[in-house]
Amino acid sequence: MEFNESIKRFSERVKVLKDSIATEEATKMSLIVPLFQLLGYDVFNPTEFCPEYTADVGIKKGEKVDYAILENGDPSILIECKSCSEVLDKHSSQLFRYFGTSPAKFGILTNGITYRFYTDLEESNKMDMVPFLEIDMLSLKDSSINELKKFCKESFDKDKIFSTAEELKYTSLIKAILSEQSENPSEDFVRFLLNGVYEGQKNQRVIEKFTPLVKKAFSSYVNEIVNSKISSALTKESDDEPAADEEVAITAEPETKIHTTDDEMESLYIIRGILAGTVPVEDIIHRDTESYFGILYKNNNRKPICRLNLDRKNKQLFIPDENKKFAKHIIESLNDIYQYKDALISVVKRYAEIE
């Protein structure tokens, strides 16, 4: 699946799951780690995606950042995670401290919904307090996807990203100011525009008179640009359509008997999120077969956590009891897996206790 489509699909998943997630650990496993997996990182290889990376601060030892992406053993990106219910504004100082003690060039602060990207544009090895990029997974724009793509493992170039970070940062800040002025034009902004169109005295009465006109003109101008873009796109789409009698060649690709679907991988992430506080997530392994999608404890066939059959209209979840007999549960959507949280936890606890 193309990267843009994968990220958009993942964005929809975030919208569905966010209200079901209550802890930081569940946020990591259900929202954050899967995103970096989509970016191409081996999230279960600590030499590449290292959890609990030590970032000692001054005399304080044992300080740890949630994750570090490593290149040749050195951190290139630090990732500080918070629960999806947390507001990020009060947590940037923590990442700021970690950033100054490591050779990492980028820092990411996230709650699984908002991702804020930082670097050291203003002073070397000192993280800027304002991010150069912010991505909202609930309101994902194509431009944000393009910037996120630069952080994919296969295309990651820290020097290239750093060289464009300043432009991104100040473009974003300017856009924020323009957005604010379009909704609530300030006196200074109205006065600035009047300097080019009004020759009379620009007193308070005149400013108040022209303020709603400035807002209306701003809105009208933006609408004209949008309509122009849409019209241009529709014209191009019409030109690109093949003629009715034009033959379109379709090449059928050979199908493999076992094909792991996106829904199956999403179910794995959900179950890992549910069990994250009970057993280490790296012990929760999937194994696909022709007849079902299996999830095992420590990759042991004798320790099945559950089985899923998602390739049908009525999706099925099978959970084993103490005698390894599977009880079938019909689920309408992947979110229904959360209804069986206690049963799944009970299964892995049984396996963990007999080790």
Image (cartoon, rainbow, N blue to C red):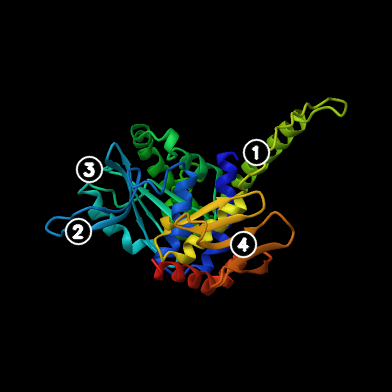
Circle 3 Cα neighbour tier, 10 Å, few/some/many (<14 / 14–19 / ≥20): few
Element at label 3:
loop
Element at label 4:
helix
Where is mark 3, residue-wise?
123
Ranked by sequence position, the earlier of labels 2 and 1 is: 2
Q: Is residue 125 visible?
A: yes
Circle 2 Cα neighbour tier, 10 Å, few/some/many (<14 / 14–19 / ≥20): few
Tag on residue 229?
1
> Would you say the residues marked 3 and 4 are in contact, meaning their CB atoms lie under 8 Å apart?
no
Q: CA distance from mark 3 to mark 4?
A: 46 Å
Q: Residue 194: x, y in percent?
A: 48, 47
Q: Amino acid at mark 1?
A: Lys
Circle 4 Cα neighbour tier, 10 Å, few/some/many (<14 / 14–19 / ≥20): some
Ranked by sequence position, the earlier of labels 4 and 2 is: 2
Task: Note whether 317 is above or below 289 in the view shown.
Answer: below
Q: Residue 348: x, y in percent?
A: 47, 67
Where is mark 2, residue-wise?
62
Ranked by sequence position, the earlier of labels 2 and 3 is: 2
Q: Left or right: 148 with respect to 67?
A: right
Q: Amino acid at mark 4?
A: Leu
Return the residue found at the far left: 59
* Quarter occupied by residue 327: bottom right
Element at label 1:
helix
Q: In front of the other: label 4 or label 1?
A: 4
Ranked by sequence position, the earlier of labels 3 and 4 is: 3
Where is mark 4, residue-wise?
334
Q: Left or right: 260 with respect to 116?
A: right
